[in-house]
Structure formats: C-alpha cells, structure tokens
C-alpha cells in the first residue's frame, strides 16, 4: 500500500537495490584502469540517498563532495533557472569527476552544471543519474551511467521530493497530481 499522496509504486526497493548494484559495477569497471582517486559529486538535495547507496557499490578509492543547486520551487514545473546554493569544497582541476544526479528531466539543470564543471578543467567528467525522463528533454545531456528510464510522471521517494516531503520513502512512487 503506497503512502498518502502517492498513487502507485513505480520502482520497488528490490528494483532500486538491483539498479544501484548494476550501476556500481559499471562505474567500478569503467574507472578500474584509470590511476588516481576519483571525485564523486552528488547534487543536493535529491541525490543524497542514491549517493549513499551508490558509493558503497563503487569498489575503488574515491572522494565525495556535494553541490547544492535548485531549479524547482515547491511545484512540479521547472523554473529553468539554476542557482548554486552551495559550491564544492574540492578542486576538480585535473581530476576524474563523476557527477551524480537523482533525475534528468528537461536536462536544463544538468546541462548548465556540466558546462560549469567543464570550465573547472577536470581530467574527465562522467554523468550518472538514478532516473531518466527522456520524453521531456529540452537540453542535451550525455548520460554515461543511467539507472532507470521512466515515463513522464512526477515521482517522489528515494531522495526525490515534493515540497521537501517524501524523500524518506524507500521506493519511488508516482505523486497524485491534484
Ligand atoms: P531538469 O533540469 O532536468 O528538468 O530537472 C532536474 C531536477 O528537477 C531534478 O534534479 C529534480 O530535482 C527535479 N525533478 C525533475 N523531475 C522530477 C520528478 O519527477 N520528481 C521530483 N521529485 N523531482 C523532479
């Protein structure tokens, strides 16, 4: 039975676990032959639950950092503006960077962040997203590691919110739109 405000469960806890394990294995294999420590950057707040699970499935030395950006207010429609509320502590210059996002929707946010990151001259920059909603894409984003492709529905849980709520749901559910 889904929680109140959620119409149905889209991705179960078991599916999430299997997805994170697969992504961790893909990322480990990709970086295995590359010497040096990689920097894994989570975009707050949505990615924090996924990040916590994902980094434990990456079987290589790494450094974690976070950046807080905001695009959505308390609604379900993107404002199109990206605001950096909290920047990185780490310098990413000449380092191998993995950017971790909760969901790529229109692509506006990630497209801007990727450009910002490239300007800081990382040695490499790869993108991992837990969810992908390609049907709504406006700005191009090259995703290197993709969890689950979902239809055009507003989802919550496993770190994703609506008005800061539902982040603690252990599954991903479809929000009831009034
Ligand atoms: P984009 O710029 O790709 O349109 O949006 C990216 C951000 O919008 C995500 O990081 C996330 O915060 C928010 N977002 C997009 N789609 C959804 C959704 O279905 N559910 C939730 N909770 N947030 C979403």
Image (cartoon, grey):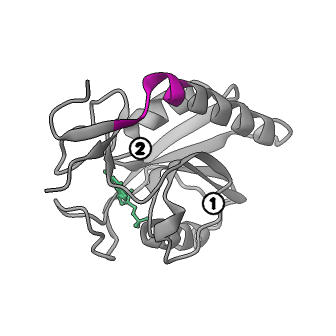
**Residue designated by label 2:** 47
Q: For residue 5, what is the image quadrant?
A: top left
User: Is label 2 within 8 A of ligand 1 (CB to nearest ligand atom)?
Assistant: yes
Per the rendered image, the range of residues in magenta is 9-17
* Image position of 115 with respect to 175: above or below: below
Q: Give the secondary structure at mark 1.
A: loop
**116 on left or right of 143:** left
Q: On the picture, is 67 further left or further right than 157?
A: right
Foreground pick, 22 / 121: 22
Which quarter shows the N terminus? top left
For this view, does 142 lie left or right of residue 2? right
Q: Residue furthest right?
A: 33
Does residue 134 appear in the picture of this structure?
yes
State the mark number for residue 142: none
Asked whether residue 113 is in view, the answer is no
Q: Position of residue 72 (x, y in %)?
A: 26, 64
Residue located at (23% from left, 39% from top): 6
- Residue 70 lies, in percent from the top left, at 29, 62
- What percent of the width, then of the height, locates residue 120? 58, 68
Give the secondary structure at mark 2. loop
Q: Which mark is residue 93?
A: 1
Eye-nearest disc, 2 or 1: 2
Q: Residues within 10 Å of mark 1 (few under 14, many from 20)?
A: some
* Residue 124 spot, x, y in % from top left: 71, 58
Identity of the residue drawn at 55% across and 32% down: 54
């Amino acid at each position: 039975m889904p929680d109140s405000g959620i119409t149905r469960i889209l991705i179960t806890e078991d599916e999430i676990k299997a997805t994170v394990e697969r992504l961790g294995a893909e990322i480990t294999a990709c970086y295995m032959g590359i010497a040096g420590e990689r920097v894994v950057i989570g975009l707050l707040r949505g990615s924090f639950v996924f990040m916590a699970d994902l980094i434990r499935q990456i079987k290589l030395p790494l450094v974690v950092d976070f950046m807080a950006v905001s695009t959505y207010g308390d609604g379900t429609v993107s404002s199109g503006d990206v605001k950096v509320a909290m920047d990185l502590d780490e310098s990413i210059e000449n380092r191998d960077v993995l950017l971790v996002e909760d969901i790529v929707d229109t692509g506006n946010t990630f497209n801007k962040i990727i450009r910002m990151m490239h300007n800081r001259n990382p040695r490499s920059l790869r993108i991992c997203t837990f969810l992908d909603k390609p049907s709504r894409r406006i700005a191009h984003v090259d995703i290197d590691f993709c969890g689950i492709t979902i239809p055009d529905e507003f989802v919550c849980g496993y770190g994703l919110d609506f008005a800061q709520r539902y982040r603690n749901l252990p599954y991903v559910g479809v929000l009831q739109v009034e």
